[in-house]
Image: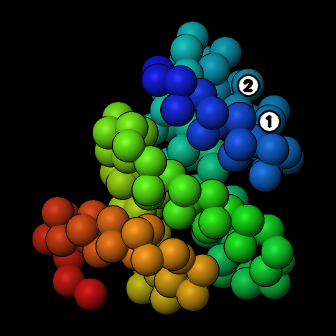
């Protein structure tokens, strides 16, 4: 796992501290940090829930401001993980994606569209 990936997990757990126990359980169960599993099974359900409720605007904005920073980073490994987990999952549900797009920065939006295209989805 890259240094930037470790930082990503630290920041996400700071933003979503209620997930720390699930994060630790995943590591114990798998014997290591499985990045895509943790993002897909722990972080994204909570983010999807926040977006579907669309009430904790401050937290959603913090998360998507952080995502914009990730989208602009130069760590190809982290960008790939981010694209194949976070951005692809956001594109799974048009309603959720529509809400998410209100909070996305330009680079995050661009990467999300690319992730959808890579999967053969159209906007």
The circle on residue 20 is 1
Q: Mark 2 — residue?
A: 24
| Picture layout, residue 51 above or below residue 42 | below
Image coordinates of residue 77 in percent, x first then y, are: 35, 35
Crowd band around label 1 with a 10 angstrom C-alpha radius: few (<14), some (14–19), many (20+) = some
| Picture layout, residue 97 above or below residue 27 | below
Image coordinates of residue 56 in percent, x first then y, are: 83, 77
| Side of 121 where 95 appears, left or right | right
Residue pictured at 79% horizontal, 51% vertical: 16
| Side of 5 where 113 appears, left or right | left
Q: CA distance from mark 2 to mark 1?
A: 6 Å
> 48 and 73: which one is in front?
73
> 67 and 49: which one is in front?
67
Q: Residue furthest top?
A: 31
Helix, strand or loop status at disc 2: helix
Residue pictured at 50% horizontal, 83% vertical: 101
Residue pictured at 18% horizontal, 71% vertical: 117
Crowd band around label 2 with a 10 angstrom C-alpha radius: few (<14), some (14–19), many (20+) = some
């Amino acid at each position: 796992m890259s240094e930037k990936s470790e930082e990503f997990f630290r920041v996400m757990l700071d933003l979503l501290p209620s997930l720390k126990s699930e994060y630790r359980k995943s590591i114990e169960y798998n014997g290591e940090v499985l990045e895509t599993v943790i993002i897909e099974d722990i972080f994204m359900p909570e983010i999807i829930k926040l977006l579907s409720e669309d009430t904790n605007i401050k937290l959603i904005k913090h998360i998507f401001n952080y995502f914009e920073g990730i989208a602009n980073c130069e760590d190809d490994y982290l960008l790939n993980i981010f694209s194949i987990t976070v951005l692809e999952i956001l594109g799974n549900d048009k309603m959720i994606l529509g809400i998410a797009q209100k909070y996305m920065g330009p680079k995050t939006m661009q990467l999300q569209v690319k992730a959808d295209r890579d999967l053969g989805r159209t906007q």
